[in-house]
């Protein structure tokens, strides 16, 4: 079932926010620039959002949904927890990594974005930890350490090379996933 016209326009406002955030950073999230880029009026904006702070909150929530919840939900569809680790890498690489990077940069100067980023980072680590517990039988504490390291590698790759080729990023993710999974299983045996 398709989105209604209003939902499509609201979604277009959010997509424009992503685009401007990537191109111009937090300075791109100004109402006149958003309206100019959309070719719509402030009235249209206020029809969909209660103000700029409401818009920014909606933007960071959309990022959480698309770049965290959707990814982990898709990966969890696989019955094999080891495959889910690989799927997460694949699904993340299918997302526009520049948006993830832009949100992180935005969070350096915006408290709402920073608070959401911190919560989302912890959620991602927690979801990865559950996968490690399931696939390797590690304790919650050990699984969280593995998840933290896995996530730190993901962030590091994106930070070192935000424009990394998707195929290369997937290969790095696959190698890292395999190494982390193998080591986590060995750790449980010892």
Image (tube, rainbow, N blue to C red):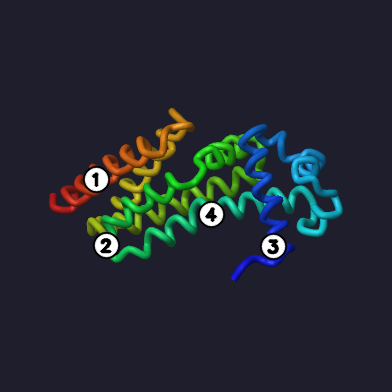
Earlier residue among tags 2 and 1: 2
In the image, 109 versus 98, the foreground residue is 98
Q: Nearer the viewer, residue 126 or 82?
A: 82
| Side of 3 relative to 187 (left or right) | right
Residue 87 to residue 100: above or below? below
Tell me which label, 4 or 3, sits earlier in the chain. 3
Give how far apart the Cα atoms at labels 3 and 1 are: 40 Å
| Mark closest to the chain's N terminus, 1 or 4 | 4
Near mark 3 (Cα within 10 A), the count class, few <14, some 14-19 or many ≥20, is few
Quadrant in the picture for residue 36: top right
- Find the residue positioned furthest to the left: 190
Q: CA distance from mark 1 to mark 4?
A: 25 Å
The residue tagged 4 is: 66
**Residue on which disc 1 sits:** 178
Q: Nearer the viewer, mark 3 or mark 2?
A: 3
Secondary-structure class at tag 4: helix
Q: Secondary structure at mark 1?
A: helix
Tag shown at residue 80: 2
Q: CA distance from mark 3 to mark 2?
A: 36 Å
Residue 8: % across, % down: 68, 59
> Quadrant of residue 44 in the image?
bottom right
Circles 4 and 3: CB distance less than 8 Å? no
Report the residue at 29% width, 45% height from top. 177
* Residue positioned most to the bottom: 1
The reply, left or right, for residue 148 in relation to residue 142 is right
Residue 152 image position (x, y, % from top left): 39, 39
- What residue would you read off at disc 3? 7
């Amino acid at each position: 079932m398709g989105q209604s016209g209003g939902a499509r326009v609201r979604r277009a406002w959010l997509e424009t926010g992503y685009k401007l955030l990537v191109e111009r950073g937090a300075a791109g999230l100004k109402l006149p620039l958003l309206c100019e880029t959309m070719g719509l009026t402030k009235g249209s904006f206020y029809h969909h959002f209660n103000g700029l702070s409401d818009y920014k909150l909606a933007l960071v929530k959309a990022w959480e949904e698309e770049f965290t919840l959707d990814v982990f939900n898709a990966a969890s569809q696989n019955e094999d927890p080891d495959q889910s680790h690989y799927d997460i890498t694949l699904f993340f690489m299918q997302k526009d990594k520049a948006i993830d990077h832009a949100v992180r940069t935005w969070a350096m100067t915006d408290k709402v974005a920073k608070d959401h980023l911190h919560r989302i980072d912890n959620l991602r680590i927690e979801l990865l930890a559950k996968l490690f517990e399931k696939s390797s039988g590690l304790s919650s504490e050990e699984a969280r350490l593995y998840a933290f390291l896995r996530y730190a590698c993901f962030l590091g790759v994106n930070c070192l090379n935000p424009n990394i080729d998707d195929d290369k990023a997937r290969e790095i993710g696959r190698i890292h996933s395999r190494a982390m999974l193998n080591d986590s299983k060995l750790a449980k045996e010892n």
